[in-house]
Structures are given as C-alpha cells and as structure tokens.
Image (cartoon, coloured by chain):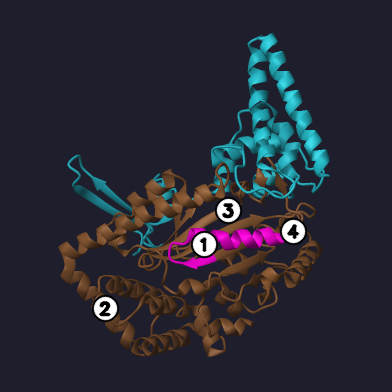
Amino acid sequence: MTLDELLTQSGEWLKGTGPEADIVISSRVRLARNLRDIPFAVRATEQQKRDLEERIREKTASSPFFKDALSLDVAGIDNVDRLLLVERHLISREHASAQGPRGVTISRQETLSLMTNEEDHLRIQALRSGLQLDAAWQEANAADDALETMLPYAYSPQLGYLTACPTNVGTGMRLSTLLHLPGIVLAKQVDRVFHTLARINYSVRGLYGEGSQALGDFYQISSQTSLGKSEPDMIAEMQSSIVPEVAKFERSCREKLMKENGLRITDRVSRSYGILGNAQLITSEETLELLSSLRFGVYLEIIKDVDLKLLNELFIFSQPGHIQKLAGKTLEPAERDRARAELIRRRLAS
Amino acid sequence: MKCQICNKNDARVHVTEMDSQQKVTKELHICDECAKQKGIAYKVELNISDLLSGFIDPNVGKTLKDMTELKCPVCGMSYAEFRAKARLGCANDYEAFDKGLLPLIEKIHGGTQHCGKHIRGTSPSVAAREREIRILERRLEQLVKTEKFEDAARVRDQIKSLKSSKEKEQNDVR
C-alpha cells in the first residue's frame, strides 16, 4: 500500500455504519506504550529516536499482524502528506508538527495505526465507524499483544504501563468518540452537557484534538483518566452509558427543535444543501458548517438522496490536505476553495 | 462570532445568566482569554502543566527543596525539570520521583493502583499483593503513631511474608 492509495479508499471508519452512527461518527481507542531500555521523548537523543524507528520497522515488518501495512517516515514526507494523515485521523496534529525522527504504520483498512516517537515511544490507535469502542479495543489490544512479544515494555505492577505524562499512566488508554451535536448546540445546552461530562472525568474538544475549535458542531468526547479501572470496565462505562446518554439527549433536543422551529430548521437545511450543490468557491470552515446542517437534514429525513457515507467522505475529502493531494500539487487558499466547491458539487450530483 | 469584550478573538465561551425563575437575563459570548480574566472557569480538559503549577504535595512540602534537587540516576532528569516540562524522562523516573509523583497521580486518577492489562511475567495477583502491601504499610504507620506496638508487630510480619513471597515469585520468573 502507498500513501497515494489512501485517496482511492475512504477508510473503514467513514462508512457511516455501526451503533448510533447517526450521531456518533467514529470511535477510537489509543494505547500509550514505552520501552524500558531507552529514555522517553524529552530525554532521547536524535540517534536514539532513529534507532527506535529502525527497531520498530524491523519488528513490524516481520510480524504477521502488520502484514500489508504502510510504514511511513513522518519526518521525511511533505507537509501536504502529513496534513492528509491528520485529516484522516491516522496521526495526531502534534505528531505532524513535531521535529525529529518519527513514524507511523497504518493497516490496510486504516483501522489501526501505530505512531512511533510521539509523546510516547508507541501510540497504538484503533478506529471504528459508529459507537464501537469494544471492537476498536479488541484490535488495539491484539496489536499491543503482538508488539509486547517483541519489545521490552516499561511497566510496573503498581502503576501499570509507564508513560511520558503521568496523566496517561496505568492502562495508557484513552477512549474517544467523535459526535455530531447540532441539536445540543442549537438548544444552547452545550455548556451544561460539557460541565456534566467534565465532572465525571470526560473531556470535550473540537474535531482535531487538544485545543482545536469545535467546527460544524462536531465534538470529541474522551476519557480523561487511565488508572484504577480495567480496560473493559472503562469501555463498558463509556459505550453503554456515557455516550448513549449524550446521544439520547441530542435526539431529544432535535425533536424539540423540530416541534418548535420546524420551518426554520427545514429552511436552514435546504439552504445549506443549495449552497453546497451550487457554490463555486467555498472555504473548509463554511463546508463543515454546511455539511453539519446537511447531516442534520439527513437525520430529519428532509434530505433523502444523501447518505451518511457520502457525508462522512465529503467531511474528510473537502479538507485542505485532501484537496491538495487530490489536485496533486500545493494550492493557494483561493485555489483550494475553488477545487473544494467543484469536488462537493460533483459528489452531490452523482 | 467575535468576543463581545475584546472584539478581537473568536467567542468560544458562552455565558447565560438566569434569574431565580430560570428566565434568561443576559447572554454573553466571549473568548477564552477574556473568560479567564473575568474569572469564568471553564474546564474542558485536564491540563498537566496547570495541575503541576498549582500542585504542592503535602508530604513533600517540607522537603520540596530536596525534591527539586533530586535527579534520576538513569536519565539524569531532575524533579524540577519534570515540573517545568510536565513530561518524564524515562521509566525509572516513576521510582526516582515517587514521593512527588504518587500524590500527583492520585490527584489525577483518584488512585494509585493499576487494575488493567498486565504484561507477561506479572500477574493480577502480583498487582493485588502490591496493593495489599501498601495498605498494610499505611496501617503500620498509623499503629506506630498511636503506639499500638503489638498490633504493629503483627502487621509488620504480614508485610514481611507478602514481600518474601513476591521476591520468590520474581526470582521464579527470572
């Protein structure tokens, strides 16, 4: 598999299937792991980082678990390629903008990625469409088992997996779900929901992780603590109660809004569809806002000829890295706006 | 939407004021910076640097000076450097800085015992035993403080036997 092939496929997690897929776009399980025989990132030398890259590449190449995977030298690829990987949720923004030797190994279906020399030596990440934290955990856990047989993990019986930051110590696990919450936003209930979640140790952030803005009513809800509970317990809590509760509240907000302001919402959805289908120039921010509105319309069955898979794909393929990669060259913002508008018109018309 | 106070940054904090009848009396849309200045706390995520800067461990208070001079013999990182960077230098730091780290970990996670997946060569029973040892050690401290020496001696023997079986098991693994 090559990096360019990512453009010809759309990633398992964009299928728009799985439980609660109308509200929960994707589920992600991340495991942080370190080796006990070399210093962590802040103390490691360039040479030690390079050696780690080499070591991981050798191990994954010989492991049946990573057969057919794509291994990339993140430091060696250009900015557009790095952006593409961020937009695809295969590497973190921090990993893209960091300095020094670092890499990523991506499975054929894009369900699994392994970042090396991120904040921790290894960051194993599994992605799924809809609310499927359990399935994502199973894959991440299996990859972790395979890696553990080949590498000496830093682990203590008391504190579990030892990580560069004490916020990740223990299971090294963080659970995240990406949700579309236009109802809660329109009903001005965002603060209430987020404060409640913060109180029980869940964080809410924008689309691309730490510090990013919530665009188009897309929010990431993530677990905050990693020590003191087993992985299956943490997954059960988030998958069976926390996220379904938020989804339930979102649905009730949507219903209430439709009852009270149906015409206004239908108007907004229809206008969004009109602009997306006809615009000649469109920024990525405007695209996200309008796609959010369109997605709401699909849920409300105001829009009947667009499905979730197409929406999810547009959501990713209309972003700057994908637009430039599709064009095969670096584009100025104005050129991107034109290429983006054209892509959206074409995809919506087909 | 621009911040209604500074008119420069994007408004990201939305405040709704209500009266006693739950009627909205005021709506304010402001940026993070102005929210901070106005003292409107809006915690969206746990920030380790903030935690560290506001965190003074009661156990370490007296010996904070000694702690900041503490260095990990393996990677050379000092405790002061960890407090500044909020990232550890190697696996051994957890042991080297345990006096400062354990209370911090307790504050972050609400506990200091891993209950999840374990690597080969360790077993959940090892983890459980470690926990047991720590609980007993705390009890021993209390008993000595309150001068209940007979009970203390019994607890001390319990700890001893738990520790020796732990060592035996570790040797078996090796």
Q: Nearer the viewer, residue A319 or A297?
A: A297
Q: Nearer the viewer, residue A86 or A130?
A: A130
Residue at image mark 1: A135
Q: Amino acid at mark 3?
A: Met
What colour denotes chain B? cyan
- The disc at residue A310 is none
User: Which of the 4 image quarters holds residue A43?
Assistant: bottom right
Residue B82 highlighted magenta (yes or no): no
Image quarter of residue B71: top right
Other-residue count near label 2 (Cα within 10 Å), few / some / many at <14 / 14–19 / ≥20: some
Residues at circles 1 and 3 in contact by the CB criterion of under 8 Å: no
SS at badge 4? loop
Q: Chain of mark 1?
A: A
Q: Residues within 10 Å of mark 3 (few under 14, many from 20)?
A: many
Q: Residue at x 76, y 51 (%)?
A: A36
Q: Colour of chain A?
A: brown
Do callouts 4 and 3 point to residues on the same chain? yes
Query: In the rendering, at what x and y percent does residue A162 appear?
Result: 68, 48
**Amino acid at pointer 1:** Ala
Give the residue number, with chain letter if any, for mark 4. Answer: A149
Give coordinates of residue B30: x percent, y percent. 36, 56
> Which region shows up in magenta?
A127-147
Residue, x 32% and y 86% (percent of image)?
A: A277
Q: CA distance from mark 4 to mark 3?
A: 19 Å
B72 to the left or right of B30: right
Give the distance between the C-alpha atoms of the residues marked 2 and 4, in whole angstroms.
51 Å
Q: Earlier in the sequence, mark 1 or mark 4?
A: 1
Q: Quadrant of residue B99?
A: top right
Q: Can residue A221 be seen at all in this image of the molecule?
A: yes
**Residue B44 seen by the camera:** no
Q: Which mark is residue A303?
A: 2
Pointer 2 or 3: first along the chain: 3
